Image (spheres, rainbow, N blue to C red):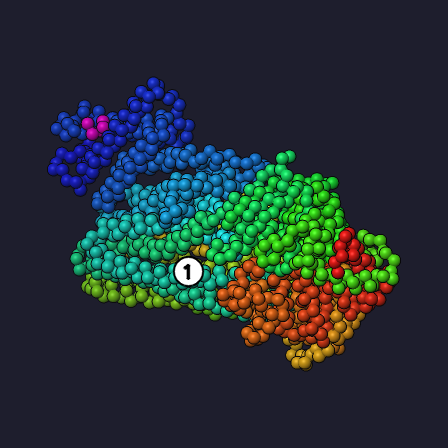
Amino acid sequence: MDLYADDFSWTCLKDFEFTSFCSQRTTIDTINLLFVCFFYTSMIISIIRRCSISCSFRTKWTFLVASICCAIISIAFYSIGLWILIVKTDNTKQLSWVACVVRGFVWTSLAVSLLVQREKWIKILNCAWWTCSCVLVSSLIIEILLRKHAIEIFDIVQWLTHFLLLFCAFQNLCYYVSQSLPESLSEPLLAQEVDTKQTELGHSTFLSKLTFSWVNSLLRLGYSKPLALEDIPSLLSEDEAEFAYQNFMHTWESLVRESSKDNTKNLVLWSVVRTHLKENILIAFYALLRTIAVTVSPLILYAFVNYSNSRDAKQTNLKEGLSIVGFLILSRVVDSVSQRHWFFDSRRSGLKIRSALMVAVYKKQLKLSSSARRRHSTGEIVNYIAVDTYRMGEFPWWFHISWTSAVQLVLSVGVLFGVVGVGALPGLVPLVICGLINVPFAKILQHCMAQFMISQDERLRSTSEILNSMKIIKLQSWEDKFKNLVENLRAKEFIWLSKSQMMKSYGTFLYWMSPTIVSAVVFLGCALFNSAPLNAGTIFTVFATLRNLSEPVRMIPEALSMMIQVKVSFDRLNTVLLDEELDSSNANRRNINQSSVNAVEIQAGNFIWDHESVFPTLRDVNLQIEQGQKIAVCGPVGAGKSSLLFAVLGEFPKISGTVNVSGTVAYVSQTSWIQSGTVRDNILFGKPMDKTRYDDAIKVCALDKDINDFSHGDLTEIGQRGINMSGGQKQRIQLARAVYNDADIYLLDDPFSAVDAHTAAILFNDCVMMALREKTVILVTHQVEFLSQVDTILVMEGGKVTQAGNYVNLLTSGTAFEQLVSAHKEAISELEQNNENKTHTEESQGFYLTKNQSEGEISYKGQLGVQLTQEEEKEIGDVGWKTIWDYISFSRCSMMLCWIILGQFAFVVLQAASTFWLVQAIEIPKLSSVTLIGVYSLISFGGTVFAFLRTSIGAHLGLKASTAFFSSFTTSIFNAPMLFFDSTPVGRILTRASSDLTILDFDIPFSITFVASVPIEILMIIGIMVYVTWQVLIVAVPAMVASKYVQGYYQASARELIRINGTTKAPVMNFAAETSLGLVTVRAFNMADRFFKNYLKLVDTDAALFFYSNAAMEWLVLRIETLQNLTVITAALLLVLVPQGYVSPGLVGLSLSYTFTLTGTQIFLTRWYCNLLNYIISVERIKQFIQLPEEPPAIVEDNRPPSSWPSKGRIDLQALEIRYRPNAPLVLKGITCTFKEGSRVGVVGRTGSGKSTLISALFRLVEPASGDILIDGINICSIGLKDLKIKLSIIPQEPTLFKGSIRTNLDPLGLYSDDDLWKALEKCQLKETISRLPNLLDSLVSDEGGNWSLGQRQLFCLGRVLLKRNRILVLDEATASIDSATDAILQQIIRQEFAKCTVITVAHRVPTVIDSDMVMVLSYGKLVEYDEPSKLMDTNSSFSKLVAEYWSSCRKNSPQTLAGSNIE
């Protein structure tokens, strides 16, 4: 009170100086009065507008407490003013009492502003007032503290109350932001089922949100038991993907409407900015608070040291020391709480951005046009989702890091100047130089990372293609070729990885070197300019300030580099989101009505796939199809049959003409598209279950017997791409999907190619002609035997409909159609001859002798009652040090780890030695400044060198480990048996090859380096604290123990969250890839919305794991910070309470400079240790696939066959039994027979009879359970796989092409000349097509051969075997997708080229096997018949029934049965 009564520091009675405290107080008073005027003016305007004032008051306790505090302070000022007016008699009272009344009025106004409800714009004014007042008063108090080293209690009370006002402003801001968000963020857009596990965040209290206590229930559950996916609470509605997407699209659409075609602005970037601006303003507030709190720390240290000096001189008292401790507590609390919410909310905002963009990309792919789909392949779509959108999730965090680092840099420079004056000026030179050096470092690092990502994308694209085509790779023994391809791509990737890691090591050297250089130059500047004494206060404040400077200097280039990468992703996403969408005018689809005569109508239609092409793909199409008509489309390979269906679907870009489609459409694609899921899910395809219709669809598609045989019936899981099903099963499932859909128009693209003749007849008669009798059907087919029963036949050639009419008319016209039919004549004549002496056999429902109770082929691949595709395996429980040690020992890096620890020990010791040197040297009177600074610089430089060595060794450790793990992982995958690929989704393998391997590349090496080295630094900090004040151990030890307990409590849940998250990412990518592959089917069935909703659920599931992982991490860090801050505050308090002279000012500065780093260092260790335990789960996951069972060796050196083997081609099957898993039922049951050398053997049998298994056994894709397979007397199981497979040739049922050129697809190993390639192409009927291409043999083959028809891909496979010319050839439905005429030509070529070879033909077309030397009939894994076709035809055999069924269909189309026809 005396100060205010006598000094009247708030009035300026002397000359006015701007730097004086009184003038600064007057300035603050003036600003406050302005705000008061604005406030009351606004209130008056509000009253006049409403004619009344609201009587409602705030109920928040914080506002009440703040208002009461303001009222008390105002009363105090009024009291002081009154006392001055009454008691004082000198002239000082003239202004002093006025100043007190003014301040009392300001505080009264503040109290009122906290209570009365106001309009939104008045709230914003008050927030600005409270914040500005707090900042101004805080600046004044800090300056008083620095200049006078003392502060009055009344000032402290006002200061603390201002912080309470700041907190109220923050609450008001939160309220304003939440109220400004769209209402859709509070309520779902669509009705959803109530989640069984709701998040507590939505109804938690303010204190719970502040301290992350709302996470307690989840952590408590995770500590009591391992968490499972169903334990994870749902997200708040405002965090869900659908709402994030709706908000993003609202902004996106408005920006697209506003933009012009020439606009270069990135619309994705601006949409994200506009959508998430308000929430990021709040995040910016947190970030600014934290930056200010960090900047204040050196000033508090400076005040402590000065207090210690003054105390030794007996010029101060205990109150000042306790005040400084109070400031320390306040700064620590603000620092901790603001940073935690900054980090959490920025990642929460990033989560919304990521989810919105993931959904936007997925939604966009549902709309992409055909040309845009070629520009954005399936792999690229997945890459946008897996890489670019995830990078977007880090955008808010890095953005706020960027600007706060700049602000921290400026403020720290200001503090440095405030402490040492102009002596800091020379220090700016090395600081600027270090910053400038960081820029090229960042650019180089960015370039390395960009090249790394490009290389990684290429490797992952090839890996994905290889995994999807692993069966053909194993059949052709191309493992070494493609393994080398992947390894070579990894080698390119590894070059950039190595450069990136070494650049980071150099960055570490610069990071630790810059403070040493800058501090040395600053000390030298102080000595030269004599601007500040080199005492403990100056030295340790400079250290603390430079510590604050070094972080921004390091982070700004890194942040800018990340922002550049984010910009690249923004550009990529902008490109895809703005790309061309499917033109709805390609086909006018409308609902069916009574007046609609034509179901499909095309007038003068011209269509083109590539707009750069000169000629249309389909031209001059005129077509009218009446409702209920059955239309067949036939023609040679590449004629445009499938393209015609695409035109009807609206998938084909139209140049001219009109396409009208009346009614709903169902589509069956030529290449079967099956979803991962159950058989039932694939048939229902999102439709509600109608048991009668469902059973009928299964029956007419001949699936009833298969489903009865499946271990789980129609609930049997289908693997990715239907990999665990036969081609026939997949085709019939998608046909059943179409039938169950009950559409008006059916587009069937060669649906019978993958089934046997008997099943094809059932499908045609029961399904197409009976079940769909009232529907309009357009059937593309090569099965000429069914054409006579349709209403109209369209004959296509060269992209045109060359003929149209019924069967009889087309035959009598004597044109191209006759050529297609005539290919059947020879086979029909032979069948007639074989049937002349036989009585007609009634059509049989099946040609199997007995119905065995064994399962179909799909079920054999798993144990009885076990699904083939299992849930992804994940570890449970503590990761522990064993896995970390496995990582070290597997890569043989234990010595490197020892060197890292030794390097860190040397670094810490030298850093401590340099600081101790300064503490001791400043006490030596005659020691020159040059010597002091030189010795310090030398010791610090030595420590920096060891830090560089430590980081470099850590980088090399990571590179060596990555090499070891990648090599073993790749080898294990390529050596895994085929069953592994049948039962493991590709996405599961790709996740390990991408995200898990990236963690091994980048995250684990630095995590291990930090976790191994930081404990040494913590021990050194505690050691120094104990050396100065040993009593700190009383708090430090319990705090460390408690920290360890809290960390263990957190880790129990965190590791399971990370593990579960590892299993939720792959389904998101798999679903996107699956949708991309089946997009035509999805759009045809009008199921885009259903797929979109399913994708939203997958994204939300993945996002929830990410959300709660981050929340749990902030929960942990906040509590660790609180515990360690107790140690820091205790150490500071002890330095105030110890007796005078007990600790020298130098040791006070030393102790506090290290003490202030304790919390940050402990958090750094905690975060990286927890990260390491989370990252190390990736090691677990990769090791799971390193430890896969291996297939037999490629080469057995002791038992290699002769180079001429097999010289004859004789195959002996001796009691052959096959099962796919131990204890599983047998798939082949004791088959014994001989394929004579040079013979042609046909293999027939119903789907699931074991035909594919027999081929797999011959190529040893599956090993015999018992029995033998001999080729020319050599047991194939006794030799190496490679020696076996290179001597066998196969044309598989599903032809596979790889991205590349025609040359690399025909001859992947590069063994043949161009002449050989052209000869092979000529023989397989592709020479003419390829010779028209501009690049000939180097012409492009796109992903999975997508730019070639299925029939052409089969011809490519034929070209491969023509080049190899092995003695044994297997044809597995080799000509199923080509027309009969081409089939006949190719069969003739095979007879000529492989006349002396053993040819095994698995076929559904009877003419393909009827001329075989021997026919093998399989039924449920048993050999039921094996004899010459003619002999089997003479008996009541299964084969004769099959031929009879085929014959009964063919004879209807025979020329002799056509009324009025004389064609021969």
Image coordinates of residue 315 in percent, x first then y, are 22, 46
Name which residue lies at 17% across and 60% down: 528
Who's the residue at 29% across and 22% down the image? 44
Residue 1463 visible here: yes
Q: Secondary structure at mark 1?
A: helix
Question: Furthest residue to the top?
Answer: 51
Q: In this rendering, is residue 389 above or below 1340?
A: above
Q: Main secondary structure of the magenta part?
A: helix
Give the quarter of the image for residue 484. Answer: bottom right
Q: Is residue 1257 left or right of residue 1075?
A: right
x, y percentage for residue 683?
67, 47
Name the residue located 68 percent from the left edge and 60 percent from the top edge. 819
Asked whether 548 or 1245 is in front, the reply is 1245
Magenta part of the chain: 98-102
Callout 1, which amino acid? Ala
Residue closer to the observer: 302 or 120: 120
Residue ID for mark 1 = 450
